[in-house]
Each structure stands twice: as C-alpha cells, then as structure tokens.
Image: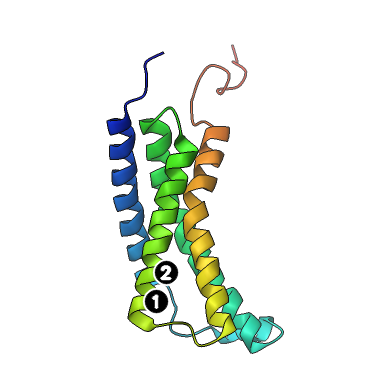
Amino acid sequence: MAKPSPLRSASVALVGLAVYCTLLWLLYARAPYVAIPHWWRRFMPNPPVALVTWFSLLNVSGAIPAAIPVAFGLVRGTEVRRLALASGIGVVAAVYIVVGGLVEFGVPPSVEGWIVDIAQFFAVSLAVVVMVVVIQGYPLTIGSSDRGPRLR
C-alpha cells in the first residue's frame, strides 16, 4: 500500500474548501432569508420558535447540497483521513461564515440570533462529514451483483 501524500491531501482539502464556500455562497445568496412565510408562522407555536426553526432549516438546506460534491471529491480524491479532511473543510467554512457575519452585522441582539448562528455553525461544519459517511456507506458502483438476476 502506497503512503498517502500530504501534498495531495492538502490540495484536495483546499479545492474542497473553495468549492464548498462557493456553493454555500451561491445557495445562501438565493435563500429566502428576508421574510418568513405566513404559512410557516401559523405552523409554529410562537414567533421566536418560527424564526429559529425557519432560519435553521434554511441553513441546513443550503449546507447539505453544497456538501454533496465536496464529499464525492473527498471520497474519490483521498483514501485516508477522509473524515478529518471533511471536518476541517466544514469547520473552516463555518468559522469563516460566522466570523464574517459577526464582523458585518455585529453581535446578535437576541438569544434567537445566537441560536441561529450556532445552528448554522453546526450545519455547515458537519454537512461534509455527514455526506462523506453516507457516500462511503453506499458506494455508487455498478457490478454484477447490482444488476439483479439475469433473465435468460
């Protein structure tokens, strides 16, 4: 077995981080953060819960699709330390987003704002790890056993 190259792992991690941040930016830029839909407000028991759950779901729904191509790249590009690389990519992206938000908008004025920021941090930092685990657990290969029984 060949020894893994640290340069290859670092380059895969840097490319993965660039792709992940770009996809997060594209997805979050199009997310409906401006207004919570009325149907969502009626669905939730009170306004603070509606606010926190809406923004948390937006953050998760942006992080998961952005993580999928990065996870595929990690699974295809590296053979060792995939979860460590995925964790590093996610944490660096999450720190960048949270620190950027604090610099641009300041400290959240309410508990709800802190909860949304913390939820976004965990969503962004864990999405790549979760997708790597899922992809490793269900490899996308087509072999003779995947085609089912042959009909003659």
Which label sits on residue 58? none
| Mark 2 neighbour class, 10 Å CA radius: few under 14, some 14 to 19, many 20 or more | some
Name above or below for residue 29 compared with residue 86.
below
Q: In which quadrant of the rendered image does the N terminus lie? A: top left
In the image, is 14 to the left or to the right of 121?
left
Residue found 54% across the figure and 83% down from its top:
37
Camera-nearest residue between 137 and 37: 137
Name above or below for residue 143 compared with residue 57.
above
Q: Please state the horizontal and vertical placement of residue 89, each as a whole percent of the image.
A: 40, 49
Q: Quadrant of residue 86?
A: top left
Report if residue 27 is visible in the image: no
Report if residue 14 is visible in the image: yes
Q: Please state the horizontal and vertical placement of residue 41, each as a whole percent of the image.
A: 62, 85
Residue found 47% across the figure and 47% down from its top:
87
**In the structure shown, which secondary structural element does the residue marked by tag 2 occupy?**
helix
Name above or below for residue 46 compared with residue 103.
below
Task: State if disc 1 and disc 2 touch (CB < 8 Å).
Answer: yes
**In the structure shown, which secondary structural element does the residue marked by tag 1 occupy?**
helix
In the image, is 97 to the left or to the right of 48?
left
Q: Quadrant of residue 74?
A: top left
Which label sits on residue 98? 2
| Mark 1 neighbour class, 10 Å CA radius: few under 14, some 14 to 19, many 20 or more | few
Residue bearing mark 1: 102
Mark 2–mark 1 Cα distance, whole angstroms, equals 6 Å
Amino acid at dot 1:
Leu
Amino acid at dot 2:
Val
Q: Please state the horizontal and vertical placement of residue 9, each as a whole percent of the image.
A: 34, 34
Way the structure is coloured:
rainbow
Q: In which quadrant of the rendered image does the C terminus lie? A: top right
